[in-house]
Amino acid sequence: MAVADQSETGEGVNYLRALRIAFLLFIAIVSFIPFLWIMMSAFKLRTDIMSPTLSFFFSPTLSNFLDAFVEGDFGTYLRNSTIVGVGTVILCLVTGVPAAYAFSRFHVLGKKHLYFFVLTTRMAPAIAVALPLYIVFKNLYLLGSIPGVILAHATFTLALVIYLMKGLFDEVPREIDQAALVDGYSEWQTFLYVILPISRSSIVATGFLAFIFSWNEFLFALLLGGTDARTLPAAFPGLVTPLGTYWGQLCAAAFAVAIPVIILATFIQKYLVKGLTLGAVKG
Amino acid sequence: MQTGVRKAPFKGYQWLWPALILIAVIELIPFIVMLVYSVRAINFLDISASGQFIGLDNYRQALNDPEFGSSIVTLSKVIVTALPIQFALGLVVALALTAHQTLRKYLLPIIIIPMIISPVVVGLIGSLNLNADFGLIGITLKQLGIVEKTILGDYNLALPAIVIIDIWQWTPFLILIFTAGLLSLPKEPYEAAYVDGASTWQVFVRVTLPLMQPIFLIALLLRFTDLFKIFDTIFIMTEGGPGSVTEVSNIYAYRVNFRFWNLGYGATLVTLLYIVSFLVCFAFVKIATLREDKR
């Protein structure tokens, strides 16, 4: 859309262009510096973090990471986070992908309400989902267990997976299914041996997105994970104590939470817009 | 779109049952249990409230609860201030980004960092940067004389700080979808407008804004509901304090349930919040389908 400039000419355009570049750089800096500050603080000694003079230069240390992940329990939390994330993705893909295929290909009752259902799961306040789960899990002895947290995360990732995958299957031409059926494949075989392989990259992207959602989640993990299935985000409040805040360890934990997500997000940038708007806006 | 769809109304269910069972277990049953709790007196800290049926008493109490009322006012303040700013800023940045392909390629991944990282990390970014003794923004504001001792602990500054952090966190979301939307607009209406001699501003108002309307609508809906849900960042930064100046409805509902363990009344509050978000959702889908019918 290079249409914006056409009515100006000569110097006016250059001036406007420079202004626009300066504005965008400013926005990028404002977005990035507060984040960078935390990532840098992860490598600072306590005295550097709490120094009243701002310094972008300091002698880096790994002591915060050692304190949190080796001396402290954050290694376990990191492991829990990974298991919960991977478990959530597997659960939602295994149950959600066939459902999405059915929604894409067959006349299934309730097809019209799928979008509404997905919207409601995305919109419900987290506490409105966490409280009932807390009550039910308490009676099923699932509180403080990793399967419990995985089930809780599936409340928002399953709908996301079904909806996104339905949209992606819709883009696969039906002639491919038809050809496979003509070749004597059953419907399940068509799905498993023909459709799944050609949808590989979209399934991976959807899985990454579901993983990010689970990895970042806080309230469910805090309430339902207890101490035994505590994930990294749920461990944050524990570092704010009446005796003081462990800023260094918090920043080290933040580093461990944020960096994998940023790396994953670069792989799926194309799917990000679609995933975050439930397919309403194409990326 | 329906051509080639195999017709057999119930056949699809062999594909669906794993998902349906999962949904029943994690969404439907808990929802029913919550409704049951909301008409009972259940308080883990009070033996006399051990599950008696009390009809709609909890709902009556909620409607007359001044703390619940003020939490809704606080939430409204956050939504009413954050949403327009995010929207306008998001659109301006998106318009600038669409005009620069190179900058877009390199800056967009950086700009979206605040929204893809965990809200918990955003909360930490807020509380450390806003610390008036050693935070990047806190020290700066202190030197400028705007802040005296603390930001998040200040009765007048805490809520604006929460709003600013939300703007920082979520404007990138609007930038991202507005940019994607602007780039996907058809070219023809623009060419026609310029042939007719329209100015840049006229084109923006008469062509871009109307074409962007569906995207504005979905952006507004998603942002509204996410703001309605706001919890994590406030919980990490202030837990609703100082006093209760940043206590939005979700934080209040959390406190009733998991600090006071008043699960009966807490379930009622949560049900009410659920109903509101459901109604907004419903109204939106109605509006969206009405628009589609008109075309």
Image (tube, coloured by chain):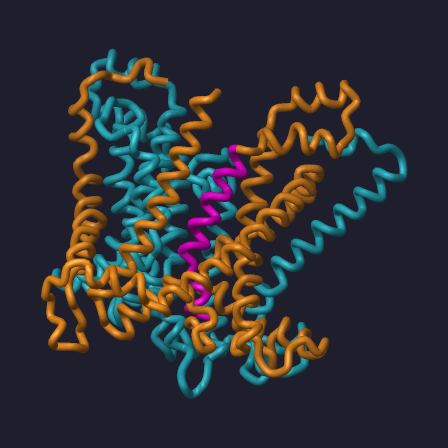
Tell whether position B222 is magenta: yes
Residue B224 appears in the rendering: yes
Look at 30% across and 34% down and name the residue there. Answer: A114
Image side of residue A136 versus residue B254, left or right: left
Q: Is residue A42 visible?
A: no
Residue A58 drawn at (x, y percent): 64, 77
Q: Which quadrant of the view contains residue A205?
A: top left
Report the residue at 33% width, 63% height from top.
Answer: A79
Which residue occupies the foreground of this view, B56 or A218? B56
Among the chains, which one is orange? B
Chain (cyan) = A
Q: Position of residue A53 (x, y in %)?
A: 67, 81
In the picture, measured across the screen, residue B33 lies left or right of residue B173, that is: left
Given the current orientation, which residue lies at the most extreme right position? A11
Q: Image height check: is B45 above or below A279?
A: below
Q: Residue at x 17, y 73 (%)?
A: B44
Over which residues does the magenta segment extend? Answer: B214-237
